[in-house]
Amino acid sequence: METVLKTESKEEQKVFNTCWEPCAIEKGMRLIGGKWTGSIVYHLKEGPIRFNELTRRLAGASKKMIDQRLKELESNGMVKRQVLNTRPVGVTYELTPFGESALHILEALRVWSESHDI
């Protein structure tokens, strides 16, 4: 059901058919709209990357923040974590097919931002 805004007077507006559930935009923003989340997904587009390399690419984000976001992305099925049999033990992160499906949205956002000098 579509939300409708009706104006009864110049000062008064009423909303009908209010959606009490989060809308599709809100649900999507919850997945990729968190601080640094979209940037992490975007930087994982080239394939598996080690944690320290990712932190170098995301200058300005703390390791703690990146770690939190990666855990969220992993729990949402957007990122896969793989432990490597190396000394010292290494970990890589890569996008799942679900995570890759968000790349066109982030690319469009990048183009839009650049075209408007944001």
Image (cartoon, helix red, strand yellow):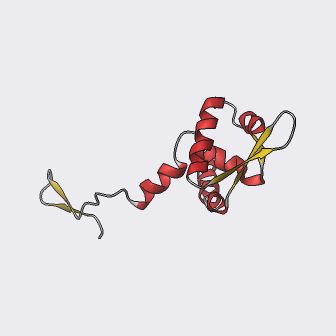
Task: Look at the image and tell me in which quarter the N terminus lies.
Answer: bottom left
The image quarter containing residue 15 is bottom left
117 relative to 95 in the view: left or right: left
| Residue 33: x %, y % from top left | 52, 47
Locate residue 108: give its quadrant. Answer: bottom right
Seen in the picture, residue 26 relative to 53 is either above or below; the reply is below
Q: Which residue in the rendered view is the most extreme toward the bottom?
A: 1
Residue placed most toward the observer, 93 or 105: 93
In the visual, does 110 lie left or right of 46? Answer: left
Q: Looking at the rendering, in which quadrant would you find the C terminus?
A: top right
Is there any visible trace of residue 118 in the rendered image? Answer: no
Seen in the image, is 77 located left or right of residue 57?
A: left
In the figure, is residue 30 to the left or right of 113?
left
Percent position (x, y) of residue 42?
67, 50
Spot occupied by residue 20 in the image (x, y as percentages of width and height)? 28, 57
Q: Residue furthest left?
A: 9
* Residue 67 visible within the image: yes
- Residue at 52%, 43% in the rendered image: 34
The residue lying at 66 percent from left, 63 percent from top is 97
Q: How far from the left and from the top, in percent, is residue 93?
A: 72, 47
